[in-house]
Image (cartoon, rainbow, N blue to C red):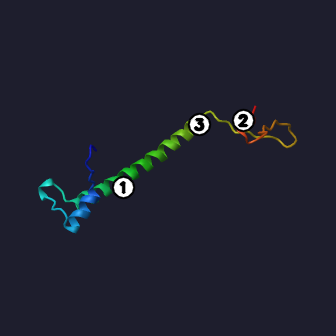
């Protein structure tokens, strides 16, 4: 931004391993510790999002099926079957 190139943790790790820069240890964590913690946090967030999505999908299904009724037809009974005339959206009536 504004003429400066941004550095990310992977670039810092690469430059520290190649010896281009010296990372101060007073920062708090080393870059490899930061990346391993970030990976762990992302895995935890992914697992939480997956379980939350599954629970919300089941809640949606339960809410939809609450008022739904099963339809059973006897053999020989007349029913109306609605089929689309065309798959073209512009031609549907």
Disc 1: CA contacts within 10 A as few (<14), some (14-19) or many (>=20):
few
Residue farthest to the top, as pictured: 93
Residue at the far left: name it. 26
Q: Nearer the viewer, residue 15 or 45?
A: 15
Q: Where is residue 69 in the image (x, y as percent from the top left)?
A: 68, 36
Q: Say which of 25 and 33 sits in front.
A: 25
Q: Is mark 3 on a helix, strand or loop?
A: helix
**Quarter of the rendering occupied by the C terminus:** top right
Secondary structure beneath dot 1 equals helix
Q: How far apart are marks 2 and 3 (CA)?
A: 29 Å
Marked residue nearer the N-terminal end (1 or 2): 1
Taking the spot 73% from the left edge, 39% from the top edge, the residue there is 71
Rounded to the nearest whole Å, what is the CA distance between mark 1 and mark 2? 45 Å
Instruction: Give left or right: position of 24 versus 44.
Output: left
Residue at point 31%, 53% (across, down): 41
Residue 68 is situated, as x and y percent measured from the top left of the image, at 65, 35
Disc 2, SS: helix
Give the residue at x 18% y 62%. 21
Foreground label between 3 and 1: 1
Tell me how many marks there are. Answer: 3
Q: Name the quadrant containing residue 40.
A: bottom left
Q: Residues within 10 Å of mark 3 (few under 14, many from 20)?
A: few
Q: In this view, does 77 lie to the left or right of 6?
A: right
Identify which residue is drawn at 22% across, 59% down: 31
Looking at the rendered image, the disc whose residue lies closer to the viewer, 2 or 3, is: 2
Q: Which mark is residue 43?
A: 1
Residue of label 3: 64
Residue on which the image places disc 2 = 90
Q: Quarter-wise, where is residue 13 in the image?
A: bottom left
Along the viewing direction, whichever of 73 and 9 lies nearer the viewer:
9
The reply to whether dot 2 and dot 3 touch (C-beta < 8 Å) is no
């Amino acid at each position: 931004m504004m003429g400066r190139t941004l550095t990310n943790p992977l670039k810092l790790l690469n430059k520290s391993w190649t010896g281009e820069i010296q990372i101060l240890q007073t920062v708090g964590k080393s870059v490899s510790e930061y990346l391993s913690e970030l990976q762990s946090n992302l895995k935890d967030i992914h697992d939480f999002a997956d379980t939350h999505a599954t629970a919300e999908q089941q809640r949606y299904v339960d809410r939809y099926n609450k008022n739904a009724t099963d339809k059973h037809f006897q053999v020989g009974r007349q029913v109306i079957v609605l089929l689309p005339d065309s798959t073209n959206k512009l031609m549907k009536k």
